[in-house]
Amino acid sequence: MHSEKGIARPQLSLNMHPKWLKGSAASEFLLPLRELGLTALEFTLNLSSSGWPEMSSLIEECCRLGFRIHFHAPFKGAYNLAGFSGAKMKEVESLYRPAIEYAVCIARETTHPTILVIHGAKGDHPRRKLRQDTEAFLTWILDKVPNLYPSLELLFREQNKTKIGDNKVELVEIVSKLSSPRVGICWDMGHEAHNIMDGGDPAIPPGFISLVNHVHVHDIAPDGEDH
């Protein structure tokens, strides 16, 4: 489940996928949930996947049903912001551009802020460089895509892997530095719980709450696997 603050009051949202329908019509699955307060849906933009045609058809149907639509930028495999502030800028930009252009097309048809959840850069580069890459990518979105509201996700920590956004203090620093009302933090409660169980600091740093524009809530299996 997801909650988004955007500009207006908080909205109850669902991370949507065609498999949730189990053969039923979108209206049959979603309209009873709307009666319970569901107002928005989030879709991951895996345009290169074999299931994308089905996903895009579902997005269009959900738009027709009147749901708010938000997006999660692709983040698996080659999708990584590392290098965006340097020599790999054009390569990373071309990789993400189809997903962003699709989100822009949908956002143009709506009157509400369209959130785009983004994972920070990751890899074996120095943390300072990965942070620069993340900040540069967010700046690019803010400058080039005025109708999307980027939300930098709180990620879970992993040993031997540097991930920008795997602690709350860093998220506050990055979003505050960008100083735009359109950019915010995606507070992933599952990742938060994962990090706390792994010894992370449960304290909420000053300024964090006011910067949250999107919230993810999901489970964690006994073996530590989330979602």
Image (tube, rainbow, N blue to C red):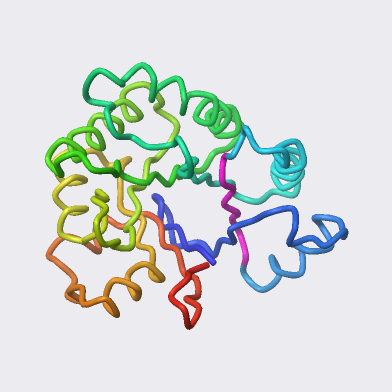
Rendered position, 199 above or below 227: below
Q: Going by the picture, which residue comes out furthest to the bottom?
A: 222
Residue 43 lies within the magenta run: yes
Quarter of the image where one finds residue 9: bottom left
Please provide the residue range marked out in magenta.
38-45
Residue 80 shown left or right of residue 45 in the figure: left
Dominant secondary-structure state across the stretch colored magenta:
strand
Q: Position of residue 209 (x, y in %)?
A: 25, 64
Q: Residue at x 53, y 29 (%)?
A: 104
Residue 98 lies within the magenta run: no
Count of numbered circles on the image: 0
Q: Where is residue 65 in the image (x, y as percent from the top left)?
A: 75, 49
Rendered position, 173 above or below 168: above
Quarter of the image where one finds residue 136: top left
- For the N terminus, the image quarter is bottom right
Rendered position, 85 above or below 178: above
Quarter of the image where one finds residue 129: top left
Q: Which residue is drawn at 57% across and 40% down?
A: 45
Q: Residue at x 24, y 48 (%)?
A: 164
Residue 129 shown left or right of residue 109 in the figure: left
Q: Residue at x 27, y 28 (%)?
A: 83
Q: Position of residue 186 (x, y in %)?
A: 36, 56
In the image, 72 versus 82, the foreground residue is 82
In the image, 23 versus 12, the foreground residue is 23
Q: Where is residue 25 in the image (x, y as percent from the top left)?
A: 86, 56
